[in-house]
Every structure is written in structure tokens, then in C-alpha cells.
Amino acid sequence: MTAASETVSYDVLVIGAGGAGLRAAIAASAAGSKVGVICKSLLGKAHTVMAEGGVAAALANVDDRDSWRVHFADTMRGGQYMNDCRMAELHAKEAPDRVRELEAWGALFDRTPDGRILQRNFGGHAYPRLAHVGDRTGLEMIRTLQDHGVHAGIEFHMECTVITLLTDGGRMAGAFGYDRERGRFRVYTAKAVVLATGGVGRAYRITSNSWEYTGDGQALAYEAGAELVDMEFLQFHPTGMVWPPSVRGILVTEGVRGEGGILANKDGRRFMFDDIPPAYKNQTADNEEEGWRYCQGDKSARRPPELLTRDHVARCINREIKAGRGSPHGGVFLDIAWIKRKLPNAPEHIKRKLPTMYHQFKELAGVDITQRPMEVGPTTHYMMGGIRVDPDSQMSSVAGLFAAGECAAGLHGANRLGGNSLSDLLVFGKRAGEYAARFAREHGDARVDERQVEAAGRQALAPLERTDAVDGAGPYQVQHDLQGMMQDLVGIVRTGPEIARALEGLEALRARAERVGVTGNREYNPGWHTALDLPHMLIVSEAIARSALERTESRGAHFRDDFPAKDESLGKVRMVVKQGADGRMALTRIPVPPVPPELQHVIEEMK
Amino acid sequence: MATATFRIWRGDARGGGYRDYRTEVGEGMVVLDAVHQIQAEHAPDLAVRWNCKAGRCGSCSAEVNGMPKLMCMTRLEDLPLEQPVTLEPMRAFPRLKDLVTDVSWNYRVKTKITPFTPRPPDAPDGTWRMQQGDVDRVMEFRKCIECFLCQDVCHVLREHRLHESFIGPRFLVYAAALEMHPLDTADRTEELRAAHGIGYCNITKCCTTVCPEGITITDNAIIPLKERVADRAYDPLRKLLRLIGLSG
């Protein structure tokens, strides 16, 4: 029996309930649509909750030299000019209103002395720009959106997972999925669908992402015929926890460095001073004293090299570890305790500014960060690439299919600046919701093809029927092997031969994934769910590997050891993958969107 | 490497029982790691709810040796491993499967509380000015990660099962955050008294004890709310003023 036991109908269906999904749902509902939201977990648990440092918006509350123009230029420079400049422009212009709107919905940010929203320094941002609440900004944001959303007439489907999107000719017709509690299939019909499913971190062994981030949105869109772009640009956050083993990869906020934290190797050397990229030379302090003054708000000082972009800092840390200058557990030292030499009440200051980090290290690693340095190393964190969308409407190449937040591509180019993801999900979540509502208004009901539903149901049940699965064909084992392979062969430093080996490995893993069997029944069965996540993870892993193989240069988050320099000609193209007519993944190149003269002028002005 | 035994409740709404699993334990491991290891080695269908693994999402609530805990923040070295570690689902909520309970009641309760109602913007730029001190007063309540451990331990819900007449500590904290929000203008005292059952709380402070965020639930949220309710509902002068229509 594969037929759906329940069908629900919406104008707009939002898949994902992190910041982007909630903001899209609120916007679509405000525009008059009947909106349903599918959450893979419980409401309010999505990864937005983990965001720590803050939301980037040129409010200019702390430094009045800031403006959308500076934010735009910073975002483009950080993205190595691979960004979709129209998205970067919209983002920089609209982020301040989106942040103020949150305040009107009840969010509380830390304040300036004159009572406005306080902003802090972050890597790659010229001025203090991140509105924040200590180091739990993401919690404040998702709770605000959640509490606002539940009074906006939106229907939430908690602990439901989408298996496939349903299409009607060339357009969206809805989605097919199941609820975790009972394992019952559901059909969601919709005139428009917004994907807001977040990232792909679970394809790697060391990641800051939770079990949910298996590239669902990217894979669903790909299978529905949409394009994925920039998939080689995967951000490794420089500072994840490295010890104890069970917490390896958990994020340590960049806010630690924003508050004056320094990186040192085992010899105590501040190695970040050793390698400052030319594009940032003019903006970076050349001595420790100046760096500290910057963190204390001295406007004449330049930022310390610890606040260079994430791609660069992650590679410098990686280099120290590889060269044998790392910390005892295979990381480097991140020290905020040292500021006691500068501030009389340093421990209290650290606890007030970084309460979550204090708690996290105290509870999980037994380290008091007000007294001792932390050990940190790079962790798979954020996918810059994703579903290719129209910059204004966020619609993909499939009519009625929209995407926002991490699963969409374009804003961040080759490297995302910290703080720009929270503003991204607000700005483009709202846009996606509005344009999806408009699409729903302008188009009638789509027709659900029962054969699609039947086929998807049959395929989803197959792992439960393969009771004869042999050793090594369990879903956890396949997932584990995939994570290890991607970490080792398509990680922070890549080479052509290794990526090619990964592509072969993916073939083998796909064959194993098609044979996995699981025990137990359909009710809240994590083994079965992992089996259903595998096809998504394999699609995004292949997209990452194919794009990474094609980009024979090093740029932003993508570093090729066999091509360590930039190639100007490749700086003009983006890698796009799409399912070919033969069912195989096909890669093409498209030009980076041209920068119109007025925006080019802004970039030059800020250089 | 040392091994330890985990006595895990397996079953669903229809019933179930404890089953023992032995697994290796290593340095720095937390209870959730052991559960994942057991899932991978022995029981692939063992149901457990989790997300962030860093004490920030509040998903992996369960009872560890009878104590309501986040499994991701409970280190094995703090438990006596010479005897089995008992893991069972939260008791205040209906059991779904294994360690997973149906917490949907909490989400329904929240929608019944009068939402945030700000005063009109007072600054020329259409926003508000707020002082850090005023914001700090409610920050403690806004740290809540909605793990519902306070609901689980509260005897009004756990033993007396008064889910229909009492919203529980989590939502008293939520109401306190709204009532003390510098911009909020709504008055929730009457609904707290009549619909939300604040009177049921007899301040035993169990909720404060189990809160993984260290929120001083009873002293800082519930008692001030109780005082407001008492002031409003039972102060004879106010009652008189209200009767003659001089006060809301």
C-alpha cells in the first residue's frame, strides 16, 4: 500500500522552518495565501538557532560611516566578486528594514548607550555591523519568527520530511512526504513551493550541522529539473571544537575573535599576521596593539588578521596543523582569556559577551574560557552554492519553485561573510514568500500526477522491504563512509586526482545506497529516515565534486592544491549542474552576472 | 576501552519495557553519543529526538537515571557507570516511541497566550529606544530553548496531569518575558489567573533546578507574575476602583 493516507492543500507550501522558511511563510501569509510549513524537526529547532554572532545590516548605529554601499562592497569582496551583484545589492539595501521589523515583532537586541540596536565587528565587515544578542542571536531570531508565525494563520507540519517534489508539466504541483511519528505518507498540493531547507554539512564527517542538513532542498530541486550553481564553494568555518571527540565540529562563534580573541599555534605565535592577502592589506592591522584597539571600537585602527575572511582563516589554521604546529588535539589555540591583561574585569566581560561559548566549553570540554585558551579547527559549515534563482523573485528555473536562505545560491559568491546568512534569510525569505504568493495568485491549481505519488511511495518503502540486507549495507554505514570520503577527498584542500576518486567512490556508494535495508517498522524509525536521506546526500556530494573538479583554480572557499592560484578566466564563470536527459548529472558554465556601472562604481569607491 | 550498560525504555503508546545495551564509552562522551552508538551498533530503529548536540536547540530531553536532562549535555563521567544508566522518555507527555514523546501540547498552549503587543514607535525613525538595563531584565527568560524539562518535572503536570488548566513553567516564563518586555502594552494578568492556572504553582522550584539554561524560573518569572495577579485580582482598593470604572 503506497497511496497517501492524507492530502492537504495550500496556495504556498514552504519546506523548511528555519529563519528563511519562517520569514517566507510569514510573507506569503501576509500576502493573502493559505500557507503550510513542513518542518523536518520540531518548530524552533532548525539550525538558525545555532547562529551566534549576529545579523549583518548597515544600520550605522555604532559607526555612522556605514551604509548599504559599504555592506554591498564588503559582501562582493568577501565573495571574490563571484556573487550575483543584484542579490548583494538587494541584501545590503533591505537588511536594515528586516532587522527593525524583527524588533517590532518582539526581538530584543543588545543596545547602544543611546538605546539603539548595538552592532559588533565581524570578519570582512568594514564597520561594526552585526546586530546581536550576546552570542545567541539565532535563538532570538527564530523564536521571534516562530512566535510571530504561529499567530499568522500558517499551518505547521512538525517532524515531516519531503521525499520528492511533485510536478505538473513544467511547473510545481506540491510535494510528497511522510510524518515521522507514524511513517504515514502525505501529499501536499500547492500552487507554489518555497524551499528553505538549509545546508549539506552532513555529507562531511566534521561539521557544525545537525542530522537534518542532508541537502534535501538542493536535491529535491535538482530532481525536479532545477539548476544548482556554485556547489564547489562550501564554507569551512575556521573555528569548530576539536575536543572531546564527540563534539568535534561544533561551532565556536567568530564573535570570540570579534571581541578580541586571538589565534595562536603551539609555539604561542599569532600566525595570522604571517599571511595577509593583498586585497585586505590596507584594511588589516600590522601589529597586535592596533588589532586590540580595533576590537575596542577605535575607529582609526584597522582590524586584526583574525578577522580576515573565513576561507582564508580556515586555510591558515589548516596549514599550522599540517605543519605540526597545532594544539594537542589537532587544532590551534583560540584565546580570549588573554584580554585580562587589558581589561580589569575580563572574566565577567567574557561571560557577558560570550555566555553560550562559556557554557559550551565549560560543560562539554571542561575548559573555562576566561582562564584558558580553546582548541579549535575548521568545520564544514555553510554551502554558498545551491539552487540557482532569480535575484529579485527567488524563483528557480522550474515555474512555481522558489528557494531562499542557505539552499539558494548567489548572494555569497565564493565565500560568505559571517552575519550575512541571517540577513540573507530575512531579506530573501521575505522576497521568496511574496513572489510565491504572487505566483499562486496568478496561477490556478496544478494537477497532481498519481503515478508520481505511487512511484515515490514504492521507492520510499523499499528499504523496509529489503530485510535480507547484508552486513555493511545498513544506512548508517553508507552515510558514515560517504562522510569520511567527502571529508578526505573533497575537503578544505582539494586536488584533481582526489576529486576524481571521490566521483568513483560516489558511484559505489550509490549502488550500496540502492540496496540498503532497515529493520523495524515505519513509526519514528531513524534507520529508515537515514536511508531516505542518502539519495539527497549523494546528489549534493556529486554536485560538489563535479563543480570542484571543473574549477581548476583556487578562489574563495574552493582551494585546489594542484592549482593554487586564481585563474582570471575562471573568475568570470560559474559552474552549473543539472540533470541531463539521460538522468546523469551534466555540468555547464555560465558567465558571472555582469556588474552594472553604478554598482561597479560603488565597488571601486570602497577599494 | 571501558564499557557501560544503558537500560533504555523501548516501546510506544501501547506499552513497552527496559532493554539493556552494552557499549564502549570514551573520554568526553555524553549520553546522546552512547545512544547514537547503540543505534549504529545494535538498534537502528531506536527512536531519539536530537538536533544541535550543543545544548542549544532543546530537542534531546529525556530522563537520565530518573532526572530530567538534555542528553547532549550530560557527560558520562558525571554518572556512576558501574551500574546501568537508565534512559526513559519524559513522563509528563504522551509516549510516542522509545525516548520520543509527543510534546505538541506545548505548541498549542503557547498560541493561547496573548501575543506581543508593542506600543507605537517613539523615535523619529519609526523605531524605539530601549536601554540595555531594561532589555537585560527579560534576557534571562528569552534564553529559553524550549526543551520542556521544566514542564516534565512540574508535579502539576507530571503527577496531577492538569494540562488542560495549567500552562506550566515554560509558558509562565514566556508570559513573564512578554509582560516585562520594554515595549509590550498588553495585560495578561487576568488570563494568567483564570485561563492559565498560575495559582496551581506552589513554588516548589523543581523547574528552576532542572533548567539547563539556568533560568531562575520561580523567583524571577513566576513569583513576580503571581504578585501582579494578586495585586490586580485581590487588592480591595483596586477592586473598588475597577467596580466604579476608574481602572482597567
Image (cartoon, coloured by chain):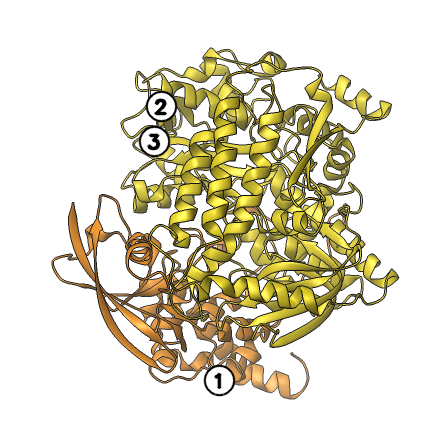
Chain colours: A yellow, B orange
- Check disc 2 and report the residue beneath it: A341
Q: Which mark is residue B41?
A: none
For image coordinates 35% across by 26% down, the residue present is A333
- Check disc 1 and report the residue beneath it: B164
- Check disc 3 and report the residue beneath it: A375
Numbered disc in front, either 1 or 3: 3
Q: Earlier in the sequence, mark 3 or mark 2?
A: 2
Pick the residue in front: B228 or B221.
B221
**Disc 1 residue type (three-letter):** Glu
For the C terminus of chain A, which image quadrant? Answer: top right
For image coordinates 48% across by 42% down, the residue present is A203
Question: Label 1's element?
Answer: loop
Q: Is residue A30 left or right of residue A52?
A: right
Question: Label 3's element?
Answer: strand
Circle 3 packing at 10 Å, graded few (<14), some (14-19), many (20+), is many
For image coordinates 57% across by 81% down, the residue present is B238
For the N terminus of chain A, which image quadrant? Answer: bottom right
Circle 1 packing at 10 Å, graded few (<14), some (14-19), many (20+), is few
Instruction: Give the image location of residue A145, x and y in percent.
Output: 62, 57
Q: Quadrant of residue B188?
A: bottom right
Q: Quadrant of residue A297?
A: top right
In the picture as drawn, the residue positioned furthest to the right comes out as A442
Asked if one can make out residue A502 in the rendered structure from this viewpoint, the answer is yes
